[in-house]
Image (cartoon, rainbow, N blue to C red):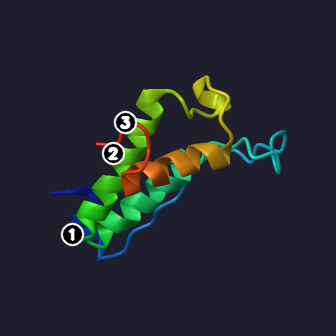
Amino acid sequence: MEAWQHPCANGLALMEAVHGTAPDIAGKNLANPTALLFSGVMMLRHLGLHDIAEDIHKAALAVIAEGKYRTGDLGGTATCSDYTKAIIDKLQGTGADSD
C-alpha cells in the first residue's frame, strides 16, 4: 500500500515543498525547484496519474545525474530556468542524452 492510499487519509492528501524562504536569492533565478516539482509528482500519484508522475520524476533525476544543469545548491551554476528547461527538454525527448 502506498502512503497516499492509506485508509486513514479518507482520500485527502497534502503535498508541500518544505524549505526556507531564501530571501538572499529571491528574484535572482537561482532557486532549485526540485522540491516543488516533486510535490507535484506526489499530487499526480495521488490522483492516479502514475505514468506522468514517473516520467517527470525520472526526467528530473536524469537532469541532476547528468550534472550539466544543476543549480548552485547542488554544486552547479545553472539558473532555475535552465534547470527547468532541461527537465522539459528531457520530457519532450529533445534534451541531450534523452532516453
Residue in the foreground of this view, choosing between 13 and 60: 60
Q: Residues within 10 Å of mark 3 (few under 14, many from 20)?
A: few
Label 2 sits on a secondary structure element that is helix
Choose the circle earlier in sequence order: 1 or 2. 1
Residue occupied by mark 2: 58
Camera-side mark, 2 or 3: 3
Residue occupied by mark 1: 7
Residue occupied by mark 3: 97
Choose the circle earlier in sequence order: 2 or 3. 2
- x, y percentage for residue 27? 82, 51
Q: On the image, which quarter does residue 61 sit in? A: top left
- Looking at the rendered image, the quarter that the C terminus falls into is top left
Amino acid found under the numbered disc labelled 3:
Asp
Camera-side mark, 1 or 2: 2
Separation of residues labelled 1 and 3 (CA atoms): 41 Å
At x 52%, y 58%, the residue is 16
Q: Is residue 35 left or right of residue 11?
A: right
- Looking at the rendered image, the quarter that the N terminus falls into is bottom left
Q: On the image, which quarter does residue 5 sit in? A: bottom left
Residue at the limit of the structure toward the top, as seen here: 75
Q: On the image, which quarter does residue 46 sit in? A: bottom left
Camera-side mark, 1 or 3: 3
Separation of residues labelled 2 and 3 (CA atoms): 13 Å
Label 1 sits on a secondary structure element that is helix
At x 31%, y 63%, the residue is 52
Amino acid found under the numbered disc labelled 2:
Lys
Amino acid found under the numbered disc labelled 1:
Pro
Label 3 sits on a secondary structure element that is loop
Residue in the foreground of this view, choosing between 99 and 72: 99
Q: Is residue 4 left or right of residue 95?
A: left
Above or below — where is 72 with respect to 21?
A: above
